Amino acid sequence: MAVERDKNHPNITIIHTAQGDVYFDFGSKGKQINVNIPGVPTLEAFDEPGRKEIEALMEKTFNPGAESTHKLMDLQAKFNETIIATQNGKPLEIGTSANLTSFETGGGGLTRKVDAKGEPVQDVALGINVAEVIKTSYRDNMRKDHKMKPEDILRHELFHYVDKASDPGLITPDKDSPLNNPMFKERRAVWFVNQFQLAEDPPRTQRISYNILDPDLDTGIAGADWKVTGKNMPGVEKGYPEPSPSNHREYPWSKHAAQQSQGSPESLGLPESALNDLKSISAMINQGTHFTEEQKLKLNVILAETINDNTQVKTSEMNL
């Protein structure tokens, strides 16, 4: 079974893939997530039919059918591995909103979470409005409109989740840096999804632009020259490679895990036996089912403090 709900934590959906498991936290009934997508102050929990619909989309996306080309399956396998490495077992929270529209957001968005005061917190959330996603269209370099598949939207938003260059916390004084271009991360995400479109049989026409209501804003994602971006992902030549299992966005939970796994008895100033005990505790916390995901995150912080006094981790957050 490719889709399973955690028996001990029914809010968690597990997508089983050949590369490992991908986790999503759908939240409890009535739960809201405060976010900062323009015009979308909160994401709501899915009702049961909506959750089943998005779970079916996830299964189709993460596990392409046997009729898919080998190239598409290879692309998805690498993407699955990258998402799994980024998650490190921490479910990505997901919700929906009627304000996620096919024209304004494509029906979906990955965004930073905020607290009650609107201040960013150390986490992100995925918003999907399936009813709008299935209506979303895009434009090619001949300015013709095409139907976008729901898988396109899901891959696009999850690309932002794993792409280091999508981190708004990356600040550079280099005025020529592509990070200073607000559309840079969008061009990368569009290029990435285009590779899946090209891998289909027959290939689908590549997207270069959103189809939006205001033509004055429709300047083209690939570039103002209305040409499809070249062979390589935008930014590769500037030192921003494609995301991969070994080169992906790092969030607080993945950094804590890295601190725990990379430390040595000498560097930590701990006896080897004590270090082994702490590693055993870490394994029990992260692999067991005794704790909720929120409790696991808190316990990992406490464990990191025990191992190393320096537990300050740079916050990684992402805009739509």
Image (cartoon, rainbow, N blue to C red):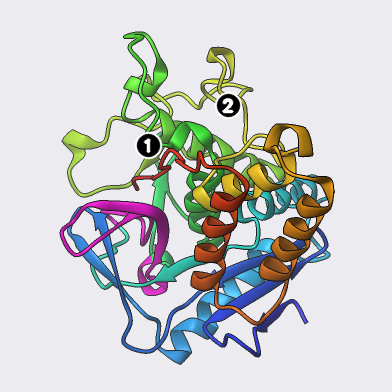
Name the one closer to the observer, 118 or 131. Answer: 118
Mark 2 lies on residue = 233
Q: Tag 1, which secondary structure?
A: loop
Indicate which disc, 1 or 2, sits on the residue closer to the N terminus: 1
The correct choice, above or below, for 191 with respect to 283 in the image is: above
Whether the magenta-drawn stretch holds residue 117 is answered as yes
Residue 110 visible in rendering: yes
Residue 205 visible in rendering: no
Which residues are drawn in magenta? Answer: 103-132
**In x, y percent, where is residue 246?**
71, 37
Name the one closer to the observer, 281 or 40. Answer: 281
**In x, y percent, where is residue 45?**
37, 80
Mark 1 and 2 residues: CB-CB less than 8 Å, in contact? no
Q: Residues within 10 Å of mark 1 (few under 14, many from 20)?
A: some
Whether the magenta-drawn stretch holds residue 245 is answered as no
Mark 1 lies on residue = 143
- Tell me the amino acid under the disc marked 2: Met
Left or right of 249? Residue 48 is: left
